């Protein structure tokens, strides 16, 4: 073989090898995540390099800000001087999903047609209802929305909103033990609705417990050479009647007499509806005394007392954060927890923790939020009272505020709502053929009293529009028909392709 032919053969081998290696490296590069040498149709390397490296996700349940981009285009560049220069040597990964593009909003007439198409056979009575587009604040459906009706447990949305506004989502309630007179300690209630007998490491969120408080107290007493004490207990944070005068006596299995000091919500069997203690603070003191005795401290007497402001604290435990409390109240529709928050609204504003002062402060707080109408009436925090009167537009306004970026303190109103067909008070709802498609999509707070049924929450429609809704039915003789209608109406909104 001549030298010329040999050189040609070698050159050809080198070229073929280079091409083969390039294809292999490109293929494996994609498999392991390395960017290709040239980008496919989409954002250019220059555009991608100027895009932000990370994006702050909105809080759970919060809507994303409206996008100004078209699907398939690059993220907008940032001009923030706080953002470090992007590395232009490699292309940044493109997003898997883009935000829903801007476009026509739901047509009110179309939404109304879908809601009116839901059969109301057997429901009876009358209703107030509304649907609001959160992004633009536009009402896309209303029916007697300003008519104040008996709301039942959706009242908890207003109570929770007021508590979060007055105290903030990270607030915690403290239960403490102080030194009283000679050889006396006083257990002081701080209005922790979920103070437990004992805590469990497997429970989330963690609950403060009398067992944990007793362990601290016993250690402090032993350190000061005390092994025998008299126990006082102070529930004076809340004042006035413990039983709301607007409740019938038959609610005794639905709610405990409200107290700033109780254990396991005063539920004797550990569940609700169920038997309740008639003396919540006294029962808590007895549980605490028993815990002290197990830790080597003799308790010679137990009686109600009131701690002085100057008494020194020797032990304390703090509740879960208020946002976690609100989520629990809404998820389980907890009457006891809601009534404690109702009183805490008054205390937070410097008022005494009575029912009358809680009513006044709730009105004042919600008025400042722009979520109170002249015909609104709130007599309790849980919605058990049939004297309450709330319109659908008021409920929707509170939910709208909670979903907006301007009120992050209210976010627990969104994150605490049960998911349809999955959890909480909606776990066994949305089971008909017309509603199963909304399972996992609709979130809402339920309400049920005799001949009163309500549902208020939010959903992102198939169009990508985030809406809040509220519906209250009064006077229905058929519980199943009324609740099914509420489920089907919200399912109709969820599945709505209603844009102009």
Image: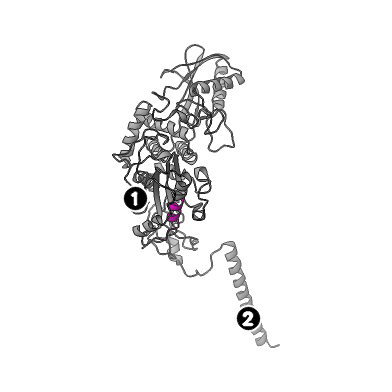
Is residue 453 part of the magenta span, yes or no? no
The answer, for residue 402, to whether it is visible in the render is no
Residue at the limit of the structure toward the bottom, as seen here: 2
Residue at 59 percent across and 72 percent down: it is 22
The first of marks 2 and 1 along the sequence is: 2
Q: Residues within 10 Å of mark 1 (few under 14, many from 20)?
A: some
Residue 143 bears which disc, if any?
1
Measured along the vertical axis of the image, is residue 475 above or below residue 89? above
Q: Dot 2 lies on which element?
A: helix
Measured along the vertical axis of the image, is residue 45 above or below residue 59? below
**How would you classify the magenta stretch by its main secondary structure?**
helix
User: Which is more toward the observer, 485 or 162?
Assistant: 485
Q: Which image quarter: residue 495?
A: bottom left
All told, the count of numbered labels is 2
Residue at 57 percent across and 65 percent down: it is 30
Region in magenta: 487-497
Direction from residue 389 to residue 263 in the image, left or right: right
User: Which is more toward the observer, 491 or 301?
Assistant: 491
Q: Which residue is mark 2?
A: 11
Residue at 62 percent across and 72 percent down: it is 21
Quadrant (top left/top right/bottom left/bottom right) for the C terminus: bottom left
x and y percentages locating residue 45 in the rendered image: 46, 66
């Amino acid at each position: 073989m001549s030298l010329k032919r040999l050189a040609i053969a070698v050159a050809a081998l080198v070229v073929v090898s280079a091409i083969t290696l390039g294809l292999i490296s490109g293929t494996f590069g994609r498999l392991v995540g390395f960017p290709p040498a040239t980008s496919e149709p989409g954002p250019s390397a220059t555009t991608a390099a100027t895009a932000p490296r990370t994006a702050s996700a909105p809080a759970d349940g919060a809507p994303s800000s409206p996008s100004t981009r078209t699907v398939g285009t690059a993220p907008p560049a940032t001009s923030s001087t706080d953002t470090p220069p992007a590395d232009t040597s490699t292309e940044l990964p493109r997003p898997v999903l883009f935000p829903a593009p801007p476009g026509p909003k739901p047509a009110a007439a179309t939404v109304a047609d879908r809601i009116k198409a839901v059969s109301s056979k057997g429901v009876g009575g009358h209703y107030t209802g509304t649907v609001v587009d959160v992004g633009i604040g536009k009402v896309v459906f209303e029916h007697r929305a300003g008519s104040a009706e008996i709301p039942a447990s959706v009242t908890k949305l207003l109570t929770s909103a007021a508590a979060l506004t007055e105290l903030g989502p990270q607030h915690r309630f403290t239960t403490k033990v102080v030194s009283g007179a000679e050889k006396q300690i006083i257990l002081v209630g701080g209005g922790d609705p979920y103070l437990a007998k004992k805590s469990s490491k497997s429970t989330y969120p963690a609950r403060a417990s009398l067992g944990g408080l007793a362990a601290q107290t016993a250690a402090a007493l032993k350190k000061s050479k005390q092994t025998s004490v008299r126990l006082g207990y102070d529930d004076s944070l809340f004042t006035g009647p413990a039983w709301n005068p607007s409740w019938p006596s038959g609610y005794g299995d639905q709610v405990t007499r409200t107290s700033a000091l109780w254990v396991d919500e005063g539920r004797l069997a550990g569940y609700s509806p169920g038997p309740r203690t008639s003396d919540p603070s006294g029962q808590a003191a007895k549980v605490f005394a028993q815990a002290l005795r197990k830790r080597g401290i003799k308790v010679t007497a137990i009686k109600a007392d009131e701690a002085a402001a100057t008494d020194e604290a020797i032990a304390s435990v703090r509740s879960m954060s208020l946002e976690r409390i609100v989520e629990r109240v809404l998820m389980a529709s907890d009457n006891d927890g809601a009534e404690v928050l109702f009183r805490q609204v008054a205390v937070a504003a410097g008022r005494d923790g009575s029912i009358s002062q809680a009513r006044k402060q709730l009105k004042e707080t919600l008025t400042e939020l722009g979520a109170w109408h002249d015909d609104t009436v709130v007599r309790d925090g849980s919605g058990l009272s049939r004297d309450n009167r709330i319109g659908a537009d008021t409920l929707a306004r509170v939910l709208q505020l909670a979903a907006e970026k301007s009120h992050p303190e209210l976010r627990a109103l969104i994150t605490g709502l049960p998911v349809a067909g999955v959890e909480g008070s909606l776990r066994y709802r949305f089971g008909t053929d017309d509603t199963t498609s909304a399972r996992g999509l609709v979130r809402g707070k339920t309400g049920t009293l005799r001949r009163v049924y309500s549902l208020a929450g939010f959903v992102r429609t198939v169009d990508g529009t985030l809406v809040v809704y509220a519906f209250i039915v009064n006077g229905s003789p058929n519980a199943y028909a009324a609740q099914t209608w509420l489920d089907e109406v919200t399912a109709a909104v969820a599945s709505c392709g209603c844009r102009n």
